[in-house]
Image (cartoon, rainbow, N blue to C red):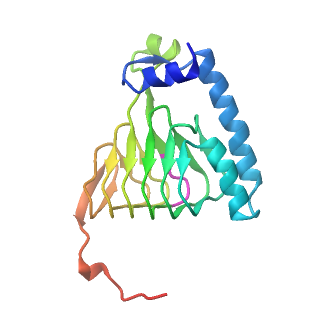
Amino acid sequence: MTLAERMAFIRTGAMYNDLAPELVRARADAVVLSNRYNASSGRPQAEREGVLRTLLGGIGQQVHFEPALRCEFGCNITIGNNFYANFDCILLDAAPITIGDNVLFGPRVGLYSANHALDAQERAAGGCYARPITIGQDVWLGAGVHVTPGVHIGAGSIIGAGSVVTRDVPAGVVAAGVPCRVLRALTPADRTGFVP
């Protein structure tokens, strides 16, 4: 099976063999490219984004990861404009990861679209499944947020530091906790009057 055929199968949501040779090679290639990107820290933005365009499925303008970015394959990640991820971002992209415009990630944010089989024998044999993750526009994920397979976070929402997001989060809310839950809606009272 080719890598493209394997990825198409994974996108169906069926259990797949995480130990398939095509996937093992693709992960190794992603490590090489992410190492190249991480080593380019301090270089011109256009040069760094050029490496990202090779590694990731698609990016907009002004996309920046502090060192170190780690992704599983890279090809299933799409990022909009004006994206910033602080240190030690992990994106496991067996299924598509889609990130909108004007998104901020705190340090050590992890998005994990894949999960292992629950049965020990199936897990040892490489059994996995994957579900897409979508991060809407204008979202902020605080430090140490972990997002699990199949989650959608709505536009404008904020996820508090240390949260584990296991379910969809609607637009325009503050959510936090383990597991993450909505705490309240964002309102005009949250504005401070800041003007750059």
Relative to 176, is 189 on the left or the right? left
Q: Is residue 40 above or below residue 23?
A: below
* Residue at 77% across, 52% down: 39
Residue at (34% x, 49% y) in the render: 178
Q: How many labels does the image show?
A: 0
Give residue 61's position: percent from left, percent from top: 56, 61
The quarter of the image holding the N terminus is top right
Instruction: Confirm whether the magenta stretch covers residue 2.
Output: no
Indicate whether 71 appears above or below 52: above
> Image check: 169 left or right of 19?
left
Rendered location of residue 112, percent (x, y): 46, 39
Q: In this view, does 159 lie above or below 110?
A: below
Residue displayed at 64% across by 49% down = 52
Residue bounds of the magenta highlight: 106-110
Q: Give the dominant element type of the magenta stretch: helix, strand or loop.
A: loop
Of 121 and 91, the residue lying toward us: 91
Residue 126: x %, y % from top left? 51, 16
Q: Nearer the viewer, residue 177 or 8?
A: 8
Residue 142 seen in render: yes
Q: Is residue 67 visible?
A: no
Q: Dividing the picture into quarters, in which one does residue 34 lie? A: top right
Q: Residue at x 70, y 56 (%)?
A: 48
